[in-house]
Amino acid sequence: MVAELLRVDGYEVWTARDGLQGYSSYYQHQAQTVVTDIDMPELDGFEMMRCIRAINPAAKVIYMSGAPEQYRRTLVTEAQNFGAAILKKPFKEADLLKLIESLPGDKTNPESYGYEWSPDQKKFVWKEAV
């Protein structure tokens, strides 16, 4: 479903059945953005991204999960350190497309930002520190 949506919207997409295949696919294609489930066989989404960041520390990622609250600490760390984003399943197609387009580039001062769960938007969002 996600792959087809992105292809229809003009994105070049590679798919994988598990985290190990996802890493292998990234190694071959070096995608600009990785969209991944957190809970996968072989390597979970976090482990897969650790491997990918050994190749490309600036790799962008959108994590998907039906229960992101159970990964809150890791997701906050991922967001603060790498600009990772999260979509809570189920989500609207438009939400995924907007999120891909809005992913931050390199942050010049990551310590000046905080990342918080937004129940309205069903994802983590950046909040500027006061």
Image: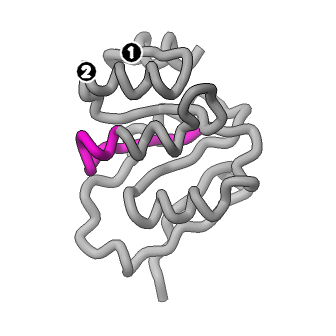
Can you say whether 63 is above or below 31 in the image? below
Q: Residues in magenta? A: 52-64
Quarter of the image for the N terminus: give it. Answer: top right
Residue drawn at point x = 50 percent, y = 74 percent: 114
Q: Is residue 58 magenta?
A: yes
Q: Is residue 127 magenta?
A: no
User: Is 67 on the left or on the right of 51, as rendered?
Assistant: right
User: Is 71 on the left or on the right of 98, as rendered?
Assistant: right
User: Is 15 on the left or on the right of 71, as rendered?
Assistant: left
Residue type (three-letter) at the residue carrying disc 2: His
Question: Percent x, y for residue 25?
Answer: 35, 19
**Dot 1 and dot 2 residues touching (CB under 8 Å):** yes
Answer with the quarter of the image where residue 23 lies.
top left
Mark with earlier residue (1, 2): 1
- Seen from the viewer's position, the closer of residues 85 and 19 is 19
Question: Percent x, y for residue 92?
Answer: 65, 30
Q: Secondary structure at mark 1?
A: loop
